[in-house]
Image (cartoon, grey):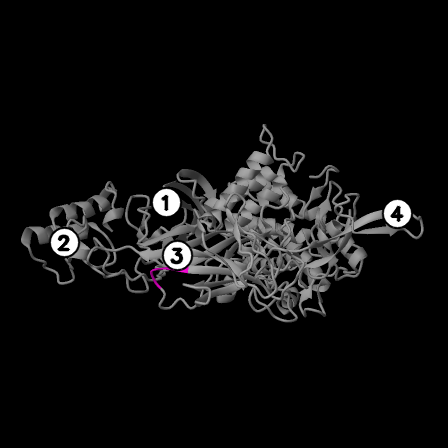
Amino acid sequence: MDKQHKYTININTEMNYWAAQPLNLASSEKPLIDTLDELAESGSITAANQYAIYNDRGDDTYEPGDPWVTHHNFDLWRGTQPIDNATAGLWPTGGAWLLDHAWQYYQYNKDEEYLAEVYPYMVGAAKFFTQFLVVDPETGYLVTAASCSPEQSGVQPGAAMDTQLIRNLYDMVVEASSVLGKTSENAELIVAINEQMPSTYLGDEEGKVAPNLIDSAGLIKEWARGDVSFDISETTDTSKIKWTVTNPFTAVVSTVYNHGASNSTNHRHCSHLWEMFPGTHLSAYSDNKDEQAIFKAFQKSVSARSTGSGQGWGLAWRIGLNARALDGDSASSMLEQLLTTRTSPNLFDQHPNFQIDGNYGATAGIIEMLIQSHDGTINILPTLPSNWQSGSFTGFKTRLGATVDLSWENNIPTEAVIHTTESGNLSIRTKYAGQAVVYNAIGEIVDSALNGDENLITFYASKNSTYTIKSFGSSIVEGDTVYYASDVTEFYASDNGTKPKLANDNTEVGYLYNREGVSIGYAVNDFSFNGLKALVLNMASVRDSNIYLTITVDSVDGTEIARQIVTTGNNEIDLYNLEGISESHTIWLTFTQDPYSSSQKYLGNAGNLTATYASSASSGDDDSTTEATTETFTETSTETTTETPKGMRGDVDNNGKITANDSACLLAYVLNNEVKNPLWIVSDYVADVDENKGISASDAALILAKTLNSAVNFAAYE
């Protein structure tokens, strides 16, 4: 609520409620959702009088389900018309955002009765936008016009936030109609929605709702037509004054400056990043190549937006964005900045002045760092900062009919307790799923399936049951190596002119002079290619939008393994030509501007280079591997539809499970030195559970202890 006692719904009001559902405080969000009843009625007047979008009856009466719209601000009297300045007020998707809170309430609680209450307001908003959207003649996409990207630059067609919210609205209407059995009742509306939506949610199709567009720098465009630069504002700051303007009617003289909007600005709003958070349609783990490209563009855009201009609520939004972008250390850094620079001694958040949004928004961001459930899985510790080494939480609610209690040590989960409210397959995501074991309430091992990347374990969960997951670990060893800018000693300029050098207390490579036709850069020595999985370069600053990075091996003229535009913040490097390159080499990072412009003296400053490496853990002298499968479980049978994994350490009878029967097999072998059943495989790899190079009764005891009471830390033996 602002100083005029209005609710600002272009971010601030919503932020206060992000944490309500995951913290199991559903009832606290109902007062917000309940405003939809009055807003829809008032908004139908605005729809008719401002936009000439009328109800089907053609009169001035109101019924739930009639077209309605609201803008960026409402108060006790539920005014829905544009107010304040055009860069904030002329924004028609405030109601669409509020409706997402109603939909998320259903996602967390599966309360169909309550969904039926709010469903007419979803229908009414969709009716408005199916008539409001127009085809932009420049881009060919359906867009809002006129509108704005809240409080950023000016009014123009095709704000990305609008089309993100409208796609989300259309999707929820179709889904809610199916849940409530109202697809036939609203068939005409659903046909209109399908005509405007692309064939896939994130699809890019001419004549359809504008997609998430990516610019030449690999960033999400804030407008369908790209960044804009045409606003002027009055100023008396002599360092900003660009023009002097004389009013021809009053002769009043004003000084003004031009200010634009782009992804390179640290604007407090991150409107075009709504799809990343709090939106729910992006997944870091999608196997669709196009969706991965979109996700990476959002990741890069989150990094480019940096910490913003420092408002408490702006930092809080960025904590959530970085959590979804899987950048836990940046999220943690922003939380620290929020607490040290924008928090009063009484813990009130400061805009400044006091604005509670930052308190509640940061709370939601912390939750997103610890658990996420927006992509159909429960992702535990998805964005855990490296310095949050141990901790626990209890009672975090998910969208998948389960509440989670979790503890962790050394940044690895130690125990997850899942309390279910629904029946069905449940997938738990963590990079430590490879060795995890699921137990039911009486300690029995539950059949589960592991995906090929060993980061997703799936099992059938019964309604109103409790499951415990233990023995987290991974046979895939993954870690980061940071190649620090401070260690750089070799610098380069293709014209043999002035070379770069270390800057800012030797934390960056600076003085990357911009000269026409010149590439300039530096070497990173002893760079390892063994197990290289990902590479990220942090750019402390980039001075223009067309700065290219090229990476070569062994020399500046060596094998090229990357060339791309870089921006301020973290840049994920797209590598190629790596076949046959192994061990350690010197790599050269060089920068150029293409096309050249003399407007900037420097290209920017380069920070640290972070490489992520992955390798499979060795299993002694045996080079056999465990084949992971994707399995489907049913309520009536615990058998899987595909062959179970074989060769699991301790699984002596090779049936894909570790049970007391395996202990009996081993004990029989030790006592009788023979195996009665040919299916019992007693080999060094499978049967030597304690890995002491011998098969003994202790191996049997370890398995028996695990199956009876889990008293033995079995992770090292699997």
Residue 217 picture location, percent across and down: 58, 61
Does label 4 or label 2 sit earlier along the sequence? 4
Residue 670 picture location, percent across and down: 9, 51
Q: Which residue is mark 4?
A: 253
Does label 1 or label 4 sit earlier along the sequence? 4
Badge 2 element: helix
Instruction: Tell me where residue 192 sits by quadrant.
Output: bottom right
* Disc 1 residue crowd, few under 14, some 14–19, many 20+, Cα 10 Å: some
**Residue 38 seen anywhere in this rendered image of the structure:** yes
Three-letter amino acid code of the residue under disc 2: Cys
Residue 258 picture location, percent across and down: 76, 53
What is the number of the mark on residue 538? none
Q: Which residue is mark 3?
A: 527
What is the number of the mark on residue 665? 2
Real-space Cα separation, disc 1 to disc 2, in angstroms: 33 Å
Residue nearer the viewer, 149 or 186: 149
